[in-house]
Amino acid sequence: MTLTRLDVQAAEQRTRAHVRRTPSFHASATLSFKLEFLQHTGTFKARGAFNRQLAARERGELDAEVGIVVASGGNAGIANAYAASVLGVPATVFVPETAPAVKVALLRTLGATVVQTGQEYVEAFAAASVFATESGALFCHAYDQAEIAAGAGVLAEELLADDPGVETIVVAVGGAGLLAGVLAAAAGRAHVVAVEPERAPTLHAALAAGAPVDVAVGGVAADSLGARRVGQIGFALAAPAHATGSLSSVLVGDDDIIAARSALWREYRIPSEYGAAAAAAALASGAYRPRSGERVAVIVCGANTDPSTF
């Protein structure tokens, strides 16, 4: 499915009453940070969750009795459980048996029914898909749904509205739902730099192969950027953008991510999880080198992390 700026603008209208318009912080004349960690639930994921659930309700597809289902013990699960609680519908979240107890507890605090199954995300995903089919619950993908991606893209719409002079947007990539939304919103208006950890190069590998492929994932950012295969929607937008030069794809090492996360806190008091810090690491490490005077905005997409580690 093709995602366009019109989809992002529709998401902006639909979700306006439910999400925060997050600010941009100008660190210098040429560098700014989009502070998306200030969003509900601490990450950008709340935007897509609300857009998916609200759009489904508009179409009569959201059954108030059975609600929504999602497979994710991380940020996507938390965001969708939060959105469901605000909209007053049940949420069922499938997580692996290995999901961190603190995240399971948070999901339950949000009112979600948590089902722990299997040892890996893929098993939880399969079980969630079966549950959606059998119960009629609205399935909310962690990243590879058009409404999820369009909702995420609203942050780029905000960024460019607040600062039309931004020439380049730097964004961390896992499954590429956020990347898809940013590419749709920024098309023809800004260059986009997609940043991945060297140990989780799903987009980088897909661009090299010409199609999404499975890759081994690991490293410090695997909890949020650990998708084994890039999403179809993200790849469908990224491949032509990369071919025409409007998208750059770069990799950063774990040491660079750790250093960038520390620098964000030390220099600006900006908290970030490792996945979000990957975007800043692209600049600090030289993986992406802006030309002289180039105005760059880095998306700090989340901060669900242990604050004692800053």
Image (cartoon, rainbow, N blue to C red):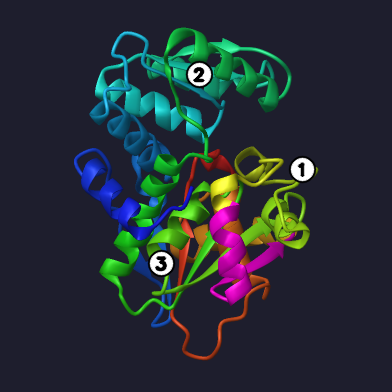
Q: Position of residue 3 (x, y in %)?
A: 43, 53
Q: Nearer the viewer, residue 310 or 103?
A: 103
* Secondary element type, mark 2: strand
* Secondary element type, mark 3: helix
Q: Which residues are magenta?
A: 235-253
Residue at 52% over, 41% down = 307
Q: Which mark sits nearer the N-terminus, 1 or 3?
A: 3
How far separated are the C-alphas under marks 2 and 3? 32 Å
What label does residue 214 carry, if any? 1
46 up-or-down from 13: above or below: above
Q: Position of residue 294 (x, y in %)?
A: 47, 85
Is residue 36 toward the left or the right of residue 174 in the image?
left
Q: Quadrant of residue 279?
A: bottom right
Q: Position of residue 267 (x, y in %)?
A: 49, 66
What label does residue 186 carry, if any? 3
Q: Quadrant of residue 198?
A: bottom right
How far separated are the C-alphas under marks 2 and 1? 24 Å
Is residue 2 toward the left or the right of residue 13 in the image?
right
Q: Position of residue 306 (x, y in %)?
A: 55, 38
Extreme residue toward the front, this view: 1
Q: Which mark sits nearer the N-terminus, 2 or 3?
A: 2
Q: Nearer the viewer, mark 2 or mark 1?
A: 1
Query: Dot 1, crowdedness within 10 Å: few (<14), some or many (≥20)?
Result: few
33 up-or-down from 191: above or below: above
Say which amino acid is labelled 1: Asp
Say which amino acid is labelled 2: Val
What label does residue 93 carry, if any? 2
Residue at 77% over, 57% down = 209
How far separated are the C-alphas under marks 1 and 3? 28 Å
Say which amino acid is labelled 3: Ala
